[in-house]
Image (cartoon, rainbow, N blue to C red):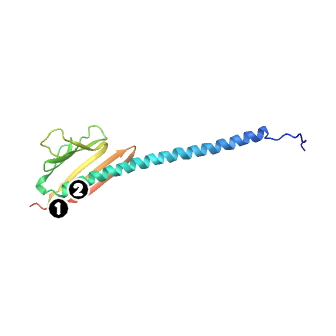
Amino acid sequence: MRKKTGRTGFTLVEIIVGLAVSSILASILGALLYYNFLLWQRNTAMTLLQQDASVIMDMLSKKIRSAKDSDITISDSDQPKTMRIGNESFYWQSATAPSTLWYDPDTNIAGNEIALATNEVTAFVPDKNSPLNSATVTITLLRNSQSVTLNFYVMYRNKA
């Protein structure tokens, strides 16, 4: 039994145990906050990629849908991969991947290109199927180790 000395407070052992428990709880809370932040970053990157992909897909689909068979040409060369629709073109230069997908609203005027997806395109594969009046496009976007691949099939106007 202990002698009553009239002193109140914590013993050294109690303080050390309290500090150890507090340190463990603080470490767990810090780890949860850190991984929550990483998850937030990843989700933000994926959301931005999906928004970029949606804009590209909508723009390409509208242009292809309004075209005739004779308006659409696909480049045979690898550099740059080009889908031309009338005087407009979409092209990707893959010299350094990931790279940029460009939209040129008028190929007769130099220097008016618009970057649709900057430094995040890892694949751009346009294809045309004349007998079926359709075009397919595959685009892969990469940002912060998150990637989105679009494969879409678009019917265009009849040959007339």
Q: In the rendering, at what x and y percent does residue 136 appear?
A: 23, 55
Give the crowd class for mark 2: few <14, some 14-19, many >=20 residues within 10 Å: many
The residue positioned 85% from the left and 39% from the top of the image is: 7
Residue ranking furthest to the left: 160
Quick one: label 1 or label 2, which is nearer the N terminus? Answer: 2
Q: In this figure, which residue is indicated by the disc labeled 2?
A: 61
User: Element at badge 1?
Assistant: helix
How crowded pointer 1 is (Cα within 10 Å; few <14, some 14-19, many 20+) is rated as few
Q: Secondary structure at mark 2?
A: helix
- Along the line of sight, which residue is nearer the eye, 159 or 39? 39
Residue 84, image x and y in percent?
16, 48
In the image, what residue occupies the spot 57% across and 43% down?
30
Amino acid type, mark 2: Ser
Residue hosting label 1: 132
| Disc ID at residue 39 | none
Q: Amino acid at mark 1?
A: Leu
- Left or right side of 10 for 27: left
Closer to viewer: mark 1 or mark 2: 2
Q: Quadrant of the C terminus?
A: bottom left
Residue 146 coordinates in the image, percent (x, y): 39, 47
